[in-house]
Image: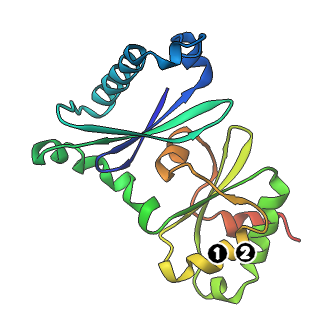
Amino acid sequence: MRLERISDNKIKFSISVEELEQKGLFEQEQWKDSVMWHDLFEDMLDEVQGKFGIEAQMEITVEIESFDEEEICMILTLELDDEDYSDFEGSMELVKPIIENDLLFHFNDLEGTIDVLNRMRHTSKFQEHPLEISFFYYESKYYLLFENIPRSQHLLIKTIVLEYGALSNLTAYMIKEYGHPIILKHAMEKMTKYFLT
């Protein structure tokens, strides 16, 4: 079970199908058993309290974001009072950038990463204003994290990068926490220096 905070009162849970099977939720008609789901949600709230120090005593909304053969992703929205919100303030700086100014893309191979960086290096718009790009490796994929990007450049960046890769549904916090950093901040300059195309 993995947790990541995606806003001040929203927590994303990624739970593998294997974990759910271990809890017996996929045995015959057990998935219809509300008691078993209640126990699962209790475990999830315990994780929230243990990791973030938040004890939710009020209304909680749960929505399934995605569900495939490997895992289920759920979003928990906690209805917190002002005092509870104050507990989030210290760490919310990790979350805000990916919502406001950051873009995260993933690539299936190294070649795609090199090609897109070389193309962007030769785009006049980015020669005038160098981009802050970090390069990560995580779960057999390559990631480029664009940080502090003006909103006016988002469309141009997506237009170029999506020819080679795809937008990731991971957050900046998660790739920084769990990914293997290869080059931080200056990926375009360093990668294109050694891998010219």
Q: Circle 1 — which element?
A: helix
Q: Residue at x 78, y 76 (%)?
A: 119
Q: Position of residue 14 (x, y in %)?
A: 52, 33
Q: Circle 2 — which element?
A: helix
What amino acid does circle 2 point to?
A: Ile
Tell me: residue 189, above or below residue 150: above
Q: Which residue is mark 2?
A: 160
Relative horizontal placement of residue 67, taking residue 60 as reference (left or right): right
Q: Position of residue 121 (x, y in %)?
A: 73, 77
Q: Residues within 10 Å of mark 1 (few under 14, many from 20)?
A: some
Q: Position of residue 87 (x, y in %)?
A: 19, 42
Tell me: residue 37, above or below residue 106: above
Q: How is the image coloured?
A: rainbow
Give the CA separation, mark 1 to mark 2.
5 Å
Residue 157 is marked as 1
**Can you tell which quarter of the image residue 129 is in?**
bottom right
Q: Position of residue 18 (x, y in %)?
A: 62, 18
Q: Residue furthest left?
A: 83
What amino acid does circle 1 point to?
A: Ile
**Can you tell which quarter of the image residue 22 is in?**
top right
Q: Residue at x 11, y 48 (%)?
A: 82
Q: Residues within 10 Å of mark 2 (few under 14, many from 20)?
A: some
Relative horizontal placement of residue 37, taking residue 139 as reference (left or right): left
